[in-house]
Image (spheres, rainbow, N blue to C red):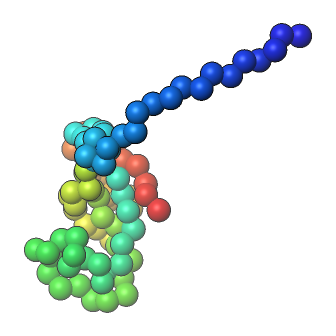
């Protein structure tokens, strides 16, 4: 039998600024939000009743793109804008 060798690859740390631009223009993320959080994420949004579960689509850098009441609608919007949607918990 041959011995398995492991290789450790050391990498430089990634800056928060570089991380924010990772996937820019290609990746968007879907995050479940409460209606109480909407004014902070989407200041231009009309007042929404408290206690609702909504879904926000964000650009890879965190910029809010859209707000909807279904995860499927957020993913469909990402696809229509040629973005790969990923979920964030």
The answer to whether one can see residue 83 in this image is no
Residue shown at 72% from the left, 18% from the top: 5
The quadrant in which residue 88 appears is bottom left
Point out the residue furthest to the top here.
2
Q: Residue 67: x and y, percent? A: 25, 67
Image side of residue 61 versus residue 5, left or right: left
The quadrant in which residue 57 appears is bottom left
State whether residue 42 is above or below residue 80.
Answer: below
Residue shown at 63% from the left, 21% from the top: 7
Quadrant location of the N terminus? top right
Residue shown at 81% from the left, 14% from the top: 3
The answer to whether one can see residue 74 in this image is yes
Image side of residue 3 versus residue 17, left or right: right
Q: Residue 68: x and y, percent? A: 28, 67
State whether residue 33 is above or below residue 74.
Answer: below
Q: Residue 52: x and y, percent? A: 36, 82
Q: How many marks?
A: 0
Point out the residue furthest to the right here.
1
Q: Residue 86: x and y, percent? A: 40, 49
Point out the residue furthest to the left here.
44
Q: Nearer the viewer, residue 50 or 73?
A: 50
State whether residue 29 is above or below residue 39.
Answer: above
């Amino acid at each position: 039998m041959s011995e398995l060798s492991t290789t450790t690859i050391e990498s430089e740390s990634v800056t928060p600024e570089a991380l924010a631009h990772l996937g820019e223009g290609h990746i968007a993320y879907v995050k479940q939000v409460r209606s109480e959080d909407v004014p902070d994420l989407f200041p231009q949004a009309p007042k929404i009743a408290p206690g609702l579960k909504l879904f926000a689509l964000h650009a890879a850098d965190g910029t809010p793109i859209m707000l909807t009441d279904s995860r499927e609608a957020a993913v469909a919007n990402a696809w229509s804008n040629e973005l790969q949607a990923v979920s964030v918990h």
